[in-house]
Amino acid sequence: MAGKEATVFILDVNPSMRQATNDEGKTYHQMAHEALFQILHSKLIAGRKTDQVTLLLVGTEGTDNILAEPDQYRRITAYTFPEDESALMRMADLQLLRYVANETENGTGDGDVFEGIIIAIKTLQDHCRHLKYIKKIYLFTDGVSPLNSEGFEDVVNQVKEMDIAFTLVGYGFESPLNSTSGSSDPQRHIQDLEAFTESVSGFVFSGDEAHSLLTQLRSKSVKPVTVFRGNLTLGDVEQQPTKAVSISIHAYNKTSEMKLPSAKKWSSVAEGMSDMRGDPAFGTVGMEREYHAAEDDVMNNDGTTGTTGAGPSDHGEGDEGTVRRKGLQNSELVRAYRYGKTLVPFTAEDEEAMKLRTQKGMSILGFLPQSRVPRHYLMSNVLILTPEPGNHEAEYYFSSLMAALEEGKGEHKFAALVRYCRVDDANPKLGVVIPGEAGFGFWCQIPFSEDIRSYTFPNLSFLVESSAVQQHETIHPQAAPMSSTFQTFTTAPATISLSNTTGAGSTPSISTSSSGRKRKMDVRQKDADETIHAVDEFIDSMDLMTAVRSTDEDGNEVQKEAYDPMDVFNPGWQRLYQCIADRAVFPDKAGLPPMNPMIVQCMDLNPAVVEASRPAAQRFEAAFAVSKVEKVKKTAKNAWALNDNPQTTMTAEGLLGLNGDAGVEDVKSEEDEDVALDLRKITAERVTKVSSEKPVEDFLAMVGGEEDLVTEAVAQLSSLITTFVTTSYHTQFYEKALDCLRTLRKTCLTEDEVSTYNDWLRQFKSRILPERHDFWETVKKEALGLITAVEVEAIPRVGEKEGVSVEEAAEFLSGDKTPGPVVESDEIMDADDLLDEMD
């Protein structure tokens, strides 16, 4: 692909373009603008700065072009770029796209499109000069307006001399280059345009053909760039220079994932600043990053110090009059690697010493048959290797190497095992080089031992093995051979006996081996030969190589491959740019455009393939007991343990698992929650300790169990809450601590542990303030303070009726002073004693 491209679009806006319409009711004027929009949209997606464009409107009321004279080149207007009004051509931008989307202007004059071609040639000549450009001209017209073909041959010669690619999109034309002769002026104009296009070896498309081609999905064109330039060596070049071979090569990406573009940060505040929209930096957001040690000292205004790990994370002066220490400089930062639960820091000197000392290049380690490279070993992107352009010696050696690999040995083609380092001191990669067409080679990375994932699967060959083999052969687990690294026999296959004792046409009976049990996976309904044949037939019916049927130019039916990677586009990428273009051109429109049907086709099954495979699929289904597995909601284990709820009944189908549930036919009622709670109480595992992993669940299990563990559970959970808050890095464990606190307060209110909760909360407040002031603010917001006497009286339970007054509870929450020491009774232990007891 050439580095620079210049394109001139000539758009006929004469009144005749708005008079005729197509079958859908669109005028030629609208169709031409839609086609031009698609071309500009593609150029904006590519985003190549060296791709320059301009637009000429023929038939405008005014005149503005580089060849304008009082009596020539009238009613032709060149597009003016807002950012540079003197520029002849520029990179396509959003302003031009919006201008075309709004259908430019409705011309009122009779502009001459042939004069537009001459202006386009002059524009390319002045802009490109003698630089190397790919030059193109597109003309969109209906050929009805007057056309002065004077100087026809001179214009043709100039187009050929400048090597300009000319494309004519004709609206209302007959089939390209096949127009019948006529006497009307419009017909002669069309013939002249078609003759001109043919003379310059250009292309003619009808409006419908252009619309069909331009509305198809397209991928972003990528300029080929070398990812590696170096030597491919065979042997030790340094130790044995006379025997070793060194070939100068270039490597390019053959396949590489086209990643979706990342979204940039945008300031919504900028939308209200209309006076700054012309600024190139309008709406953009900058980011600054600052590092602080987790335990940086914070200097308070009164001269005392705290830690950043316990306080708010705002910079500058905090709510409590604290001033944060200055952030760490880059020179104060080093890299640290995790070793178990420990971070091991490495200095810059350590990092340098740790590097592998490798040399840039590709080295052949040996050769092996291509059949010895498993398909699942091929990973990462594929590189295409070529000899250095213009280096005849490299071309000779490289083509000889590829020819030797292609010829191989006997029936085996060979591949080269190659070690690859892209730059000096880079981590090496292993790959195989396989010969391609035209003497090129393909390099594909293969895994190291650490990259291979080994899994063990049960052998399912018993589903298709013949009965004769199974009746006389048993494979024991300890003697089963390894079919591959990724598949092992974990159980001995059952021996299946197929017999047809009920007469012709009956279904063969399937009996299990000496174990007397049929395998769960054994759902075969036919014998082995019929089963294998049904599977083969089903696969053949879905052959993609001949799935798409169409007709060629002569009307003959042809078959082509379905889902060819060259024809299958990334639906996520296509949808993203469809929405970006719509939002960019119409920013005030509500909603986004509907999904393009062609995008959906990339994700759906091919209807032709589905229809062709339907009979084979039915025979395949008949060979196995295939049924759809409905996804069901998980139910509580031991669902057989029913309670006294009369609306909860057990079904036989449920016990056998025939209807997919756990055997309980549950009718919704107001008592459902209590029923589930009773079931959990009966079937739950005995819990005696509140864990930090799931503290709320463990606490409720201890409180709701048959044993009286309420007091112990309250003590353990309160201790965990204190631990969560005091050891949290900033707000890391705050949410978990709040969940626990809500549950603890609710339970203490209903389980006669009001005094225990109130006493602990006083200690808790004195323990966490002032360092954890932000957590206490959340406690205040959620009103998780002391339990009041009013709350206690509202609970219809027999037991202690203690609680503080409403005034005292409010003062406790809002008071800034840390509460004084609380006299503890013998029954109340402090947090440290509770932790010791838990241990």
Image (spheres, rainbow, N blue to C red):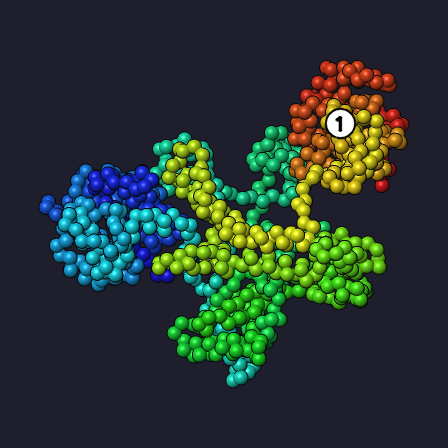
Q: Quadrant of residue 779?
A: top right
Q: Secondary structure at mark 1?
A: helix
Q: Position of residue 666 (x, y in %)?
A: 75, 30
* Residue drawn at (15%, 47%) of the image: 184
* Residue drawn at (50%, 60%) of the image: 545
Q: Quadrant of residue 293?
A: top right
Which residue is under mark 1? 672
Of the 4 image quadrants, the one containing the N terminus is bottom left
Judge whether 461 appears above or below 262 on screen: below
In the shown orientation, is residue 239 left or right of residue 652? left
Judge whether 228 appears above or below 61 on screen: below
* Residue drawn at (46%, 76%) of the image: 399
Q: Nearer the viewer, residue 199 or 583?
A: 199
Q: What's under tag 1, amino acid-wise?
A: Asp
In the shown orientation, is residue 105 left or right of residue 526? left
Q: Position of residue 24 (x, y in %)?
A: 33, 40
Of the 4 image quadrants, the one containing the C terminus is top right
Tell which residue pokes out farthest to the bottom in this image: 242
Judge whether 820 appears above or below 401 on screen: above
Q: Nearer the viewer, residue 729 or 439?
A: 439
* Residue drawn at (46%, 70%) of the image: 437
Q: Quadrant of residue 772?
A: top right
Q: Position of residue 760 (x, y in %)?
A: 79, 27
